Amino acid sequence: MAEKNEKEAPKAKKLADPAAATIDPASQQMIQRAHDLGVETAFDRAVTMKPCNIGTQGICCKNCGMGPCRLPLPKGGIEGEDTRKGICGATPNTIAARNFIRMIAGGAAAHSDHGRSVAEIFMAAARKETDAYKIKDKKKLIEVAGVLGVDTTVEVDGEQLDRDMDEIAVEVGEKALNEWGKAEGELLFARRAPEPRYELWQKQGVLPRNIDREIVEIMHRTHIGVDQDYKNLMKQGTRAAIADGWGGSMLATELQDILFGTPYPLASEANLGVMKEDMVNIVIHGHEPVLSEMIVAVSQKKEMHEYAKSRGAKGIQLSGICCTANEILQRHGVPLCGTFLQQELAIITGACDAMVVDIQCIFQNLANVAKCFHTKLITTHPIARMEQDNVIHIEFDEHHAIEDAERIVKLAIDNFETRKSEVMIPRQKSPIVAGFGVESIEYHLGGMFRGSYYTLNDNIINGRIRGIGGVVGCNNVRTRHNESHIQIVKELIKNDVIVLTTGCNAIACAMEGLLTPESARVFCGPGLAEVCETVGIPPVLHLGSCVDNSRILLAATEVVKAGGLGNDISDLPAAGSAPEWMSEKAISIGHYFVASGVYTVFGVTLPVSGAPVFKDYLFKEFEKMYGGMWDLEVDPIKHAHKMIAHIDKKRSDLGIDKARERILVDMAARRELESA
Ligand code: SF4
Ligand code: MSK
């Protein structure tokens, strides 16, 4: 027998097959390059790190030191009574429900803490404590003031006069910040939902009291020995999810719009090909636009361009990854570099002079990849640092925001000359039109003089548009990058379903060329194509980042208000989807859509299969209580058709399933429809 240490050559590490890992040729090229250079990415780690079968089913509990207790479903399922229990007696339903609502708490906390940071900066701007931020959208300030109960006029000598904008802004800031921790009352934005929805939440006892409290209460209830009834646990999960969608996320969106401007459609480009070899490439990644807004402003300064030229570059090319990308795209047209799963690949181009990150969805492995190239990886947020020693931390502070941004941009420029390896930027990039929102949909579909949602509703009623699909969410290495996103969206628009998109789905659609008005002719059914061509919009409308899912809620509310399609969001021919979700935020988003009355289908997996009774509660019973429910469908085409079937059911319930001819709905007919 040969000596043990002589006998075997070390096993070659298993690597991802680029074509199996992603549908995107640019990403395939970069995964292959990573292999050639010996750089490991998430795609490779997914080959060796298999998911835990018990965790996947949602029935592993580690909420106390007597566990972890694992209750896998027996092969062949449960026959007779389900006797599985943890040491404390917790049932699979309790464990799965506790895990599920802890995910909601994680997601709601992430969105809401982002919202809180924005509210704090808003407050600093309103109080004029910073020169860097100013109130940009005064119209929206007035609108939001109205919802928060802030007076916008003042009585002087019996006359109502406009109040001073600065005073209004300070009061809006105070009221907004109060939403996180007020001692009594209820979430103010809940009143923005259609009246029947608000009343339903009231009846179900799920109106949020304040944002933080609902999240904290989840952590309390899921502690060992507290709430051990999956229905009661889900009630709290629902309250916290509403506090996210109609609270933390919505406040983030609205205050960002007031501070940085409400987005309107603009043209840009998407995919790794937006990086430029002869320019300083700064890639911004994360979620909060407060820093990236400053970086955009600083990199547009003439002196920065001069400085870049003095260091041998032709200029500065900004681009973005994940939702920071969506934020700076929708307000400034900064191109999208890539999705969540392309973050490591952007560095592997060898052309990324600095990657600047803030919070959420940032791989710790970026530091290891950056080490193999010249890239400066810069963390900027006090709550999101990395342990690796090549990471530079420049803490961003609104009181010296411009100086911080200048320091970061200069660091990137100085790094341009130090590129080590050959630069390889994939050539792929697609033209896009992005930056839609509640206001611009109204404008585009209603026209300048009669801006309203009636035109959209008319086209849904006459069947040109079959329904609305909200398709959002992440990428997940457990499924081929972007494949489900694209197949689902294409199947929906082929069947005349207009798609509203945010997050990484929006970036995937952008890369595929679906965010252009011209794509309507190529990919849509005849009805949707006609509407898109007539009004000049893409069939897939980019509505922004993860927190901007609140725009979808408000757009749905406007559709309800415009009339003819029922009285509540749950009446609309609409469905939601997160084809490649991975984050806790996606679970919170999914659940606030469900609680708002939307049938919501997830792809990949859902951690509920090990507790069939709990699963049925989410997938079936929820519809009876809220009009919306969860579903899981891994096959993209079946996934799209489940959404379409739900849309058709709603059309039939509304009595518009056979209305295929164009009917011009005049005011009298509309009144009739509304009173029906
Ligand atoms: Fe096990 Fe109960 Fe402790 Fe969970 S809380 S780990 S089920 S003993
Ligand atoms: S970035 S949460 S991977 S959508 Fe908002 Fe993309 Fe999901 Fe992060």
Image (cartoon, grey):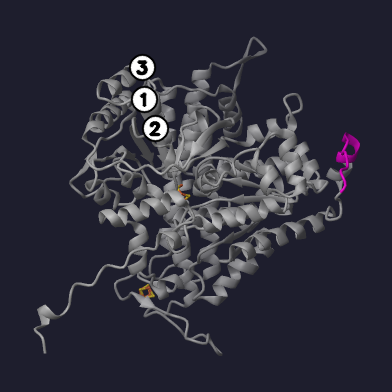
- Give the magenta range: 661-670
The answer, for residue 675, to whether it is visible in the render is: yes
Q: Is 573 left or right of 319, judged from the image as shown?
A: right
Type of the residue with mark 1: Ser
Label 1, secondary structure: give it. Answer: helix
Residue at x-position 49% and y-position 76%: 610
Asked if labels 1 and 2 touch by Cβ distance under 8 angstroms, the answer is yes
Q: Is 411 left or right of 676, judged from the image as shown?
A: left
- CA gap between label 2 and label 3 equals 15 Å
Q: Estimate the x, y position of residue 301 in percent, counting from the top left.
A: 37, 19
- CA gap between label 3 and label 1 equals 8 Å
- Identify the residue at the far left of this view: 3
Q: Is residue 663 magenta?
A: yes
Tag 1 residue: 299
Tag 3 residue: 302
Label 3, secondary structure: give it. Answer: helix
Q: Earlier in the sequence, mark 2 or mark 1?
A: 1
Count the marks: 3
